[in-house]
Amino acid sequence: MVLVTAANGRVGSAAVDALVRLEVPVRAGARNLVAGRARHPEAEVVPLDLTAPATWDPALDGVGHLVLIVPTDHFDPAPILALVQRAERVSRVVLLSAHGIEERPHPMQAVEAAVQARDLWHIARPTTFAQGLFDASAAADAQQGEVTLPMGEGRAAFVDATDVGEALARLATLDAAPRAWHLTGPHALDGVALAMVWSTLLDHDVRYAPMSPSAFADRLARTGLPKPVIEMLVGFHQDLADGVMAQVSADLPTLLGRGPRSVLAVGARQHIPLARLPTPDAAAFMGRLAAHNDRDWFRANRKAFDAAVSTPLDRALASMGAALGGRAQRFRQFQSVRFHKNRPPLKTTCYGVIVDRPGTASGLYLQIDPVGLYAGCGYHDLAKDQLHTFRQAVDSPAGDRLDEAARCVEAAGLVVEGKRLRTVPRGFSRHHPHARWLAHQEVLVGRRWSVDTWPAPEHWLAEVEAVWGAAEPLVRWLDAHVGPSRIPPEQRYGRSRATR
């Protein structure tokens, strides 16, 4: 049995939900039983108040693992330390702490020390939650065309609170040596990037307006917050300005088996009105283009193409590139017919990529065609040195881990594909245990939506990003064992490819 404290909160609710999905017996500790039972119908909900010791023993009875989440309005470590001591029969404690806690005085330091004195423990240290960027005050400012934050030119890898809750659930069931886990979002964003995210969500221009620490403190004081809380929040935002939370960690993908959600996906999930993104009308236009593949027809219908296809796709690529880190690029619609006189003048797909992302050679791919929408990623068109390195890795024990990664992404509903040779390359047996992979000349993974299954506007960004996140195990294998090409572009391929 796993007990989750503060189970009605954002992180606690996510932890309980994840444990239920994992089919782990879970007990949700909540101050408000009515709200808890409504929120967690599949869990055992019990009264638990960290400031009321009388509720502790009944909640801890029969518990093997404790997920200790301290409510954000609780700043006295004494009751928490007493609860940790009272939970002496609990075999493992998973503590939700805070980023950078080891670097400056913080009430949670004593709690961390008490947890680390036990035999089995894990500590999660997340950066700041992305959900805080989309509260009522921030939304009101953004509606007026400004994002006001006291973070100067600093950057932070804002993390999804739901991802953190799921990570806590994984830690509660993880058989691994005790350690502290640094949980971050996929990319560090500055104020300008956050303004771009708001611009996408609201479909109007939003600019970043830095706020001084004193103005921020005055703003908090007007809300009636106690002075110690204001001082803590001002110091916290100073950390943002200093870039203390800019480092991106691989700990969260390791725990989740997928990429973390971006700030953009978090904002979209909070039902903020979205800008116009690609709709099934885009696929319908590409169908008409396929039937009228003619330069004159396209020029006559260029405004309709821009309205239905290119502008929404550009907006999606640019905003997701800002949120995930990378450069967005949409490819030209006209085809080169100089050496292919019989080739139609126009492509019947409209596609773009997000490339140059930190820490990976994989691009993120979006395509609209007459059939529907496709999102994917991976290593496209392996260069000579990449192909050699890839085959060496497949022929080693790492080939088994590639199989595991592929099974993981396929279990998430994605399809692994890519150009392949008809048989294994020279020097390898066609009975090789990984013959499937040896024939690959590229490794791509993705998902397709038809016109009928096209994501709804309020879920579009999250569903597309979820594909890229679910592909993380396979992409991480490619990054670890292949990586980017190290030879000049003009020498990467054979003669037939170079001249095509």
Image (spheres, helix red, strand yellow):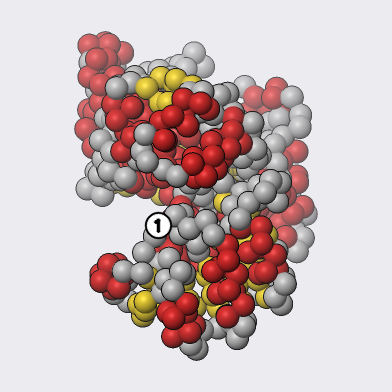
**Observer-nearest of 448 and 32:** 32
Badge count: 1
Q: Residue at x 48, y 84 (%)?
A: 57
Q: Residue furthest bottom?
A: 62
Say whether residue 269 is visible: yes
Identify whether 426 is placed above or below 86.
above
Q: Which residue is drawn at 44% across and 29% down?
A: 218
Quadrant location of the C terminus in the rendered image? top right
Identify whether 139 is placed above or below 169.
above
Identify whether 205 is placed above or below 119.
above
Pointer 1 residue: 10
Q: Residue 233 at x, y = what percent?
A: 51, 40
Q: Is residue 329 left or right of residue 269?
A: right
Q: Which residue is drawn at 59% across and 33% down?
A: 238
Q: Is mark 1 on a helix, strand or loop?
A: helix
Identify whether 159 is placed above or below 288.
below
Q: In this view, does 446 lie to the left or right of 188?
A: left
Say whether residue 415 is visible: no
Q: Which residue lies furthest to the front in this view?
A: 227
**Observer-nearest of 191 and 333:** 191
Q: Residue 28 at x, y = what percent?
A: 40, 74
Q: Which amino acid does label 1 sit on?
A: Arg
Q: Residue 473 at x, y = what percent?
A: 58, 55
Q: Residue at x 25, y 35 (%)?
A: 273
Q: Residue 45 at x, y = what percent?
A: 35, 77
Res. 196 image quadrant: top left
